[in-house]
Amino acid sequence: MRKRIISLILVMTLVVMMSETALAENKIVAESGKKIEQLLTNNSIDSKECRKQINEDMEELEKCGILEAGIIQKIEAKAGESKNYKIKIGDYTNAITVLNNSDDMFEFEVVQDDITEIVKVTATGEICIDGNKVRIENEEENNKTGDVMAFDSQLWFQKKCPYGKAADYSKYLSTVSNGDIRLTKTLQDISISAYVTVVVACGGKELAGWVASSVYTALRNYEPNTKGISYKAKKYYHKKSSSSGYIKSIRQYVYKYIYTWYTKANYKGKTAKATAYRVKEIY
């Protein structure tokens, strides 16, 4: 599920304000916010400065797709020092140390088993892994999205069908894709956090961190030495809604995405499947 986490305080406030339906469909965000708050309390992290820095780190990790893909298990923090986070993403535990979180960049070290790497994301969207620049090409602008523009809205991805049955989303709208996602390292040598950061940047608003992470193991097992992957996603809307995806009874815009991921660029190699629902709520 994908929702922008502005700060831990705002998360907890929003959770209280959400309706019961929203809470039911928003378990990942709610549980994540509660888990983080619990960790801060258990570790006696009550410094305003320290909490502010942690909030800022969480916001950046969410932008990278890491926070929505995983669960925070541990926080180690002291004011003025590097912040350490243990995050569980699927079957993998990543130890993340934030090295720099400024207006210019977000830089962190990630350790996963025998993998250690430095990931840097600049304010301009440039990503480097161990000093090697990742080529980011987002093809979403060339795809028909059918989106309704709004100034005040929330957008997220979820696994569960938000309305009706999965089979009801049978009206085809378009296919979104990216045929050349370059990782700079082989899949067996890149952590799931670095992988998610790159893939989310290349997918833009057409996929979430948890969607990317859900196929990491399969792609890695199929083709551990690949350095480039690709994906296509067929986009559908409910049979009783318009092509905008608007469902009146829940007052939300919903699209169903059926992803096909490929172990090589240009839609070649072995494949892995994933399904997600993209929900937009406008106020």
Image (cartoon, rainbow, N blue to C red):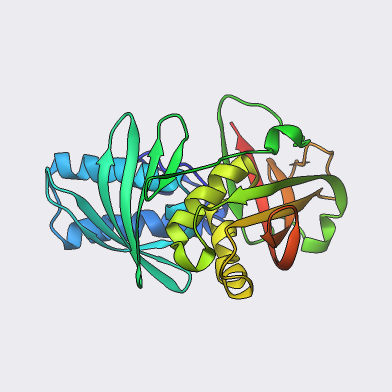
As drawn, 270 above or below 253:
below
Q: Horizontally, is 44 left or right of 14 in the view?
A: left
The percent coordinates of residue 151 (x first, y second) are 57, 24
Q: Which residue does the image show at 60% across and 63% down from the upper left?
A: 226
Of 175 and 132, which appears nearest the observer? 132
| Image quadrant containing the C terminus | top right
The percent coordinates of residue 127 (x first, y second) are 45, 41
Would you say residue 11 is visible in this rendering? no
Would you say residue 106 is visible in this rendering? yes
Q: Horizontally, is 215 left or right of 54 in the view?
A: right
The percent coordinates of residue 274 (x first, y second) are 68, 63
Of 9 and 135, which appears nearest the observer? 135
Q: Which residue does the image show at 40% across and 31% down from the upper left?
A: 123
Q: Which residue does the image show at 27% across and 49% down from the upper left?
A: 98
As drawn, 239 above or below 101:
below
Q: Horizontally, is 226 left or right of 89 in the view?
A: right
The percent coordinates of residue 216 (x first, y second) are 56, 66
As drawn, 51 above or below 102:
below
| Image quadrant containing the N terminus | bottom right
Of 242 and 202, which appears nearest the observer? 202
Q: How many marks?
A: 0
